[in-house]
Amino acid sequence: MASSATLPIIDIAAFLPGSDATLDEKARCADALSTACRETGFFYLTGHGIPTERTDEIVQLARAFFLTASDEEKASIARQGAGVGRGDGARGYQRVGENVTQGKRDWHEAVDLYRDIDAGEPPYALCRGVNLWPRTPEGLRESYQAYIRQLAVLGEAVVGAMGFALDPADADVFADHTREGFWGMRLIGYPPPPAASTLPDGDEVGFSCGEHSDYGCLTFLSTDASRGALQVKHRAAGWIVADPIPGAFVVNIGDMMEHWTNGLWKSTRHRVMHAGDDWRISVPFFFEPDFEARIEPLETCVKRTGGTAIFAPLRYGDHLLQKVGGNFYGGG
C-alpha cells in the first residue's frame, strides 16, 4: 500500500534563460533542488516556462495514436532488432508485453524515440538508427519535435541549477557533458490491466511498468490526469503515489546523477500500477549525457561522501547500450 507522503515542489524559474534572479534567489532554488535530489530523487517542477497547453497537446496526441492508429500502422513502425530492416533494437513501436522489467513483461504499449543522428542507410547498430515516427494523428511529429527543443532548454537549466547547488563556481559541471545529450522519449499507453484468466497458460505479466530506476540523467514526465498509478519508493515512507499536478512536471534523477555525485544524490526506484478502466497516457522525456560523455564521481562529491569513489568511470553510451539491450522480451 502506498504512503500519503508527497514529493517536494521546486520552482526552477530562477535558472531559466533570461532570468534576472539574484544570486540569493538562485541559491534558494539550488538548495531546495539539492535537498530533493538527496532525500527523494523525485520532485514536481514548476516555473519551467512550458505552457500547460503544450503538455496537454503532447499527451492528447499520444492518446490519439494508441487508440486510433491501425494495427497496420503500428506494425509498420515496430521496433526491430539491430541490423534487421530499419531496426536498431531500440527505436519504434512496442506491443503490450514486449517491454520487460525485472524479467516480467510490462502491460503497456510504447513508441521509443532517441536523439537524431547521421545514421545513413541500414543496417543499423543498437541505438544508432533513425526514429520511426507515428503518422497518426496528423501533426504529431512536428509538435513533438518542437516540444523536444523546449525540453532540451529546460534540461540545461535544471542541470545548471544542480551544478550550482554543488559548487556555484563550477555550475557547468553537468552542462559541459550534456550539450549534445543523447536524449530519449517514450510515448506510453497503459491499457486497463488484464484479468489473470485471460492470459495464456504460463504467461507472467508484471506491473503496468515494473520497479526500476532510470539509467540516465533527468526524466521530465507529462501524463494525463489518471491518479494512483505512478509510485515512488520513498526512502523513509516506502511507496508513495506521485499523482500529476496541473502545470508541473514530475522529475526524477537517473543513475548517472547518482554516479556523478558518488551516491550523494540517489536515483530512486519507481513503478506504474494502473488500475483504471480507461487507458493511461504518459510521455517521459529523458535528458541525458552526451553519448561519448565520461561519467565519474566528482571530486567535490567524493569528499562529501567519505573520501572514496564508489563508482568506476564509464562512457555513457556504453551504459546506455547495456541497459537498452536488456529491455525487451524475446518471445512471441
Image (cartoon, grey):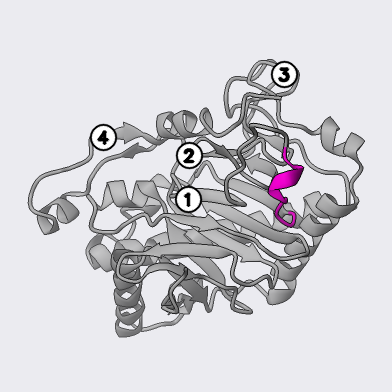
Q: Earlier in the sequence, mark 1 or mark 2?
A: 2
Q: How many other residues sit within 10 Å of disc 1, few (<14), some (14-19) or many (≥20)?
A: some
Q: Earlier in the sequence, mark 2 or mark 3?
A: 2
Q: Secondary structure at mark 1?
A: strand
User: How far apart are labels 4 and 1 at the CA level?
Assistant: 26 Å
Number of the front mark, 4 or 1: 1
Number of the front mark, 2 or 3: 2
Callout 4 amino acid = Pro
Q: How many other residues sit within 10 Å of disc 3, few (<14), some (14-19) or many (≥20)?
A: few
Q: How many other residues sit within 10 Å of disc 2, few (<14), some (14-19) or many (≥20)?
A: few
Number of the front mark, 3 or 1: 1
Q: Is residue 22 left or right of residue 141?
A: left
Q: Secondary structure at mark 3?
A: loop
Magenta segment range? 191-199
Mark drawn on residue 102 = 2
Counting from the top left corner in percent of width and height, residue 218 is at 46, 55
Residue at the spot of label 4: 313
Mark drawn on residue 211 = 1
Which residue is found at the position 48% from the left and 29% from the top? 321
* Residue 196 belongs to magenta span: yes
Callout 1 amino acid = Glu
Which residue is found at the position 36% from the left and 78% from the top? 29
Number of the front mark, 2 or 4: 2
- The answer to whether marks 1 and 2 mark residues whose Cβ atoms lie closer than 8 Å is yes
Q: How many other residues sit within 10 Å of disc 4, few (<14), some (14-19) or many (≥20)?
A: few
Which residue is found at the position 50% from the left and 44% from the top? 181
User: How far apart are labels 3 and 4 at the CA level?
Assistant: 33 Å
Residue at the spot of label 3: 121
Q: Earlier in the sequence, mark 4 or mark 1?
A: 1
- The answer to whether marks 3 and 4 mark residues whose Cβ atoms lie closer than 8 Å is no
